[in-house]
Image (tube, coloured by chain):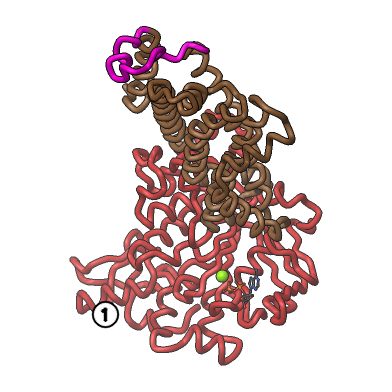
Amino acid sequence: MIEFSNVSKRFGQGEAVDGVSLQIASGELFVLVGPSGSGKSTLLRMINRLVEPDEGSVRIDGKDVRDTPATDLRRGIGYAIQSVGLFPHWSVARNIGTVPRLLGWSNDRIEARVQELMAMLELDAGIATRLPAELSGGQQQRVGVARAMAATPAIVLMDEPFGALDPVTREKLQHAFRRIHADTGTTVVFVTHDMDEALQLGDRIAFIDGGHVRQCGTPLELLLSPADEVVRGFVGGASAGLRLLSVRKVRDAMTPGSVADGTPSINADADLRQALSMMVDSRLRTLRVDGADGQVISLDGLLAPPR
Amino acid sequence: MNWRIALPALALVALLLWLPHSAPAFHAMFPALGKPVYLRTGFGQLVAIHAGIVLLASATAVLVGLAVAALVTRPFAGSLLPTANAVAVVGQTIPPVAVLVLSVPLLGFGAPPTLLALTVYGVLPVLGQAIAGLRSVPPDAIAAADGMGYGPWRRLKDAELPLAVPAIMSGVRLSVIVAVGTATIGSTVGATTLGSPIVEGLVGNNPAYVVQGALLVAALAMLFDGLLEWVERRVTSRGR
Ligand SMILES: Nc1ncnc2c1ncn2[C@@H]1O[C@H](COP(=O)(O)OP(=O)(O)O)[C@@H](O)[C@H]1O
Ligand SMILES: [Mg+2]
């Protein structure tokens, strides 16, 4: 568990982080979302001591991060950033193996781990010997994520890792990352200024504004009961309804029922936004649910209050 | 086959083999000269001493230049950076012969003042280029290195210096090539180098000596340049 207790940080005049308390559970994918300059990166960087708080403390599993030497602490925590920061003079494989090498792993073990990570991030094994400049932006970012996860850290920090990617590539990486997180059980703290990304990825979300936590909760909680007008403004707007659909699964809104033979079907783990899209596309109010006999998803189901 | 090494090496060997027997050729070129081939010291010995002085001075200069550049680019020593930069830039505008003349009172005549002058003068391009190279390291790479748990020393060794290698190597090449040329004027303060036939030829009105020394200096300079280019390529492709 990562625990912020009343932490503050000043840079010159302004308070970048002001009396923040947060608890992040082990295995959680926790998102810090908020406008640019709100203090998200500063909070994140307190976890691996790239920033030291002026007041308060950050604890990992009960132990103050200041009690561990900074380099040891950082080798145990993955870190991925928007600009990626791959070493341009090292091959993909060597970049991914950076932290294991710092930790003194054997070459065989590093090589095996690099191959495993490249497969996990859907990177073609043939690019292992390429230099970062020879990769696409999406590939570089995948390498950056692989590098952050290389030494199987219990915690991974990600600072707008997909921020510089085009929407299609970004969505692919979000999906891949969600799956990897589910498979590995790593605690992830993820910074983004993009509310859709936060809603799509987060188990829980902390909305940061002006160095404060305005609200902390599940995506559904933020959407259904924003704590104040600022949060409402950020989660709401024209696409509020679609966002609400996108954070709920077909599985959570399906009802017993039957449909005519030949009706298209949708996966129970698809989100309701995809279900709505399929209904509009096929001009049907009710769809069959894959692998759930006797269950359907209907327009009424989409409109019913979340349960 | 690396022609940038092989050709100057062949030229050097050919010159060393041919020059002792070149009296007829130089006599034909300069009929007025009684002794058309430099004999005071063997050409092979001159080349060896010359190369030795250059290597010793350049190796020292590279180490000193890199160490100072690495030091002044650390955050805690930031106040020294402008001074170091100014020394590197302004220093190179001072002619090497001035440095040579200034070292004579310190070390007397012969090889020592030449070594000192070459070293001092050779530090400057390395220092200037290494500072430029270290400062141009992408901040992202540094941020990533810090975030992954690199200590300051390891970060310098694994990330900053390798990324600065192209700039550093251009400084090293410049430094060595200038040293090959400058070592010749060491002969004016009594060092035995490939400058000896040149200086004696100029003083004694013997153009054949000048040509013999100059040919060997040129071949040696090209050989060093080819070797350094090869080193540069080896070093930059190391991390693959
Ligand atoms: N190293 C620093 N020096 C000075 N000011 C900083 C530094 N880091 C962050 N700040 C300031 O602190 C505030 C919060 O920054 P940051 O945590 O980077 O915000 P976010 O990641 O939410 O965009 C901003 O006003 C920023 O300018
Ligand atoms: Mg930020």
Nearest the camera: A105 or A302? Answer: A105
x and y, in percent, of residue B37 in the image:
41, 13
Nearest the camera: B197 or B227? Answer: B197
Report the chain shown in brown. B
- Three-letter amino acid code at the position of disc 1: Arg
Whether residue B155 sits left or right of residue B31 in the image: it is right
**What type of secondary structure mainly makes up the magenta span?**
loop
Compared to residue B127, the image places residue A29 above or below, namely below
Q: Mark 1 lies on which chain?
A: A
Visual hue assigned to chain A? red
x and y, in percent, of residue A43 in the image:
66, 69
Compared to residue B201, the image places residue B156 above or below, namely below
Q: Does A257 appear in magenta?
A: no
Which residue is at the far left? A262
Q: Which residue is drawn at 73% across and 52% down?
A: A70
Whether residue A278 sits left or right of residue B21 in the image: it is left
Whether residue A238 sits left or right of residue A23 in the image: it is left
Q: Residue at x 55, y 48 (%)?
A: B92
Q: Mark 1 points at which residue?
A: A285
Q: Does B28 appear in magenta?
A: yes
Bin the neighbour count of mark 1 within 10 Å (Cα to Cα): few under 14, some 14-19, many 20 and up: some
Query: Which quadrant contains ligand 2?
Result: bottom right
What span is in magenta? B21-41
x and y, in percent, of residue A158 in the image:
55, 61
